[in-house]
C-alpha cells in the first residue's frame, strides 16, 4: 500500500517527477535545439503550451522525453516562466559560445542559475 501511495501523493501535490521536451527549430542559417525539463508546471499546461512554440518561418519539432539528453553546453536551472510562478530547467545544445548571451538572459530575465556543462 505504501508503494502506491507515494506516486499518488506526488501527483496530487503537483510535483512532476520526470518530464521534458526537446524543441528543435530550423530555418535558413538557423538550427537551435533546447530541452525544457519541467520543475513545477502543471503537466497539461507543459504539454499544450510550454512545449508547443509557434515560430513564424521556422520548422519546429517537439519530442517528449523523461529527461533532457546529455550533451548540453549549459543549463538555466530553475528558470521562472514569463511572470508565472512556474519553473523549469532549460538545457542548451549546439554552439557553446552562445552562452555569452544566454547566461545573462537566464540570470536576469528568467531569474535562473546558469550552469556551464
Image: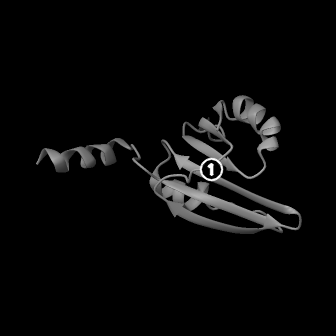
Q: Which residue is mark 1?
A: 71
Residue 54 visible from this viewpoint? no
Residue at left offset 18%, top offset 50%: 4
Where 112 falls versus 40 (above or below)?
Answer: above
Q: Position of residue 107 (x, y in %)?
A: 70, 29
Q: Is residue 78 left or right of residue 3?
A: right
Q: Specify the quadrant of the image occupied by residue 31.
A: bottom right
x and y, in percent, of residue 38 in the image:
51, 47
Tell me if residue 65 comes above or below residue 70 in the rendering: below
- Indicate left or right for 30 with 90 as reference: right
> Crowdedness of circle 1 by 10 Å Cα count: few (<14), some, many (20+)?
few
Q: How is the image coloured?
A: one colour
Q: Position of residue 5 (x, y in %)?
A: 19, 46
Q: Is residue 44 left or right of residue 103?
A: left
Q: Is 43 left or right of 86, judged from the image as shown?
A: left
**Furthest residue in direction right, as rendered:** 29
- Quarter of the view holding residue 69: bottom right
Outermost left residue = 1
Residue 81 in percent (x, y) is at 62, 41
Q: Identify the image quadrant of the C terminus.
A: top right
Is residue 15 something that shows in the picture?
A: yes
Please tell me in which quadrant of the rendered image residue 99 appears: top right
Tell me the residue at 17%/47% (across/down).
3
The residue depicted at 78 percent of the width and 66 percent of the height is: 26
Is disc 1 placed on a helix, strand or loop?
A: loop
The mark total stands at: 1
Vertical relation: 57 (above or below) 71: below
Residue occupying the point 52% across, 62% down = 64
- The foreground one among 51 and 29 is 29
Amino acid at each position: 500500500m505504501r508503494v502506491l501511495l507515494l506516486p499518488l501523493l506526488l501527483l496530487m501535490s503537483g510535483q512532476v517527477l520526470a518530464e521534458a521536451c526537446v524543441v528543435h527549430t530550423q530555418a535558413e542559417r538557423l538550427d537551435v535545439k533546447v530541452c525544457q525539463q519541467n520543475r513545477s508546471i502543471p503537466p497539461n499546461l507543459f504539454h499544450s503550451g510550454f512545449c508547443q512554440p509557434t515560430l513564424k518561418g521556422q520548422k519546429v519539432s517537439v519530442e517528449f522525453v523523461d529527461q533532457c539528453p546529455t550533451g548540453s553546453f549549459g543549463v538555466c536551472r530553475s528558470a521562472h516562466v514569463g511572470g508565472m510562478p512556474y519553473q523549469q530547467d532549460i538545457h542548451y545544445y549546439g554552439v557553446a559560445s552562445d552562452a555569452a548571451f544566454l547566461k545573462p538572459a537566464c540570470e536576469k530575465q528568467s531569474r535562473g542559475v546558469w550552469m556551464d556543462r
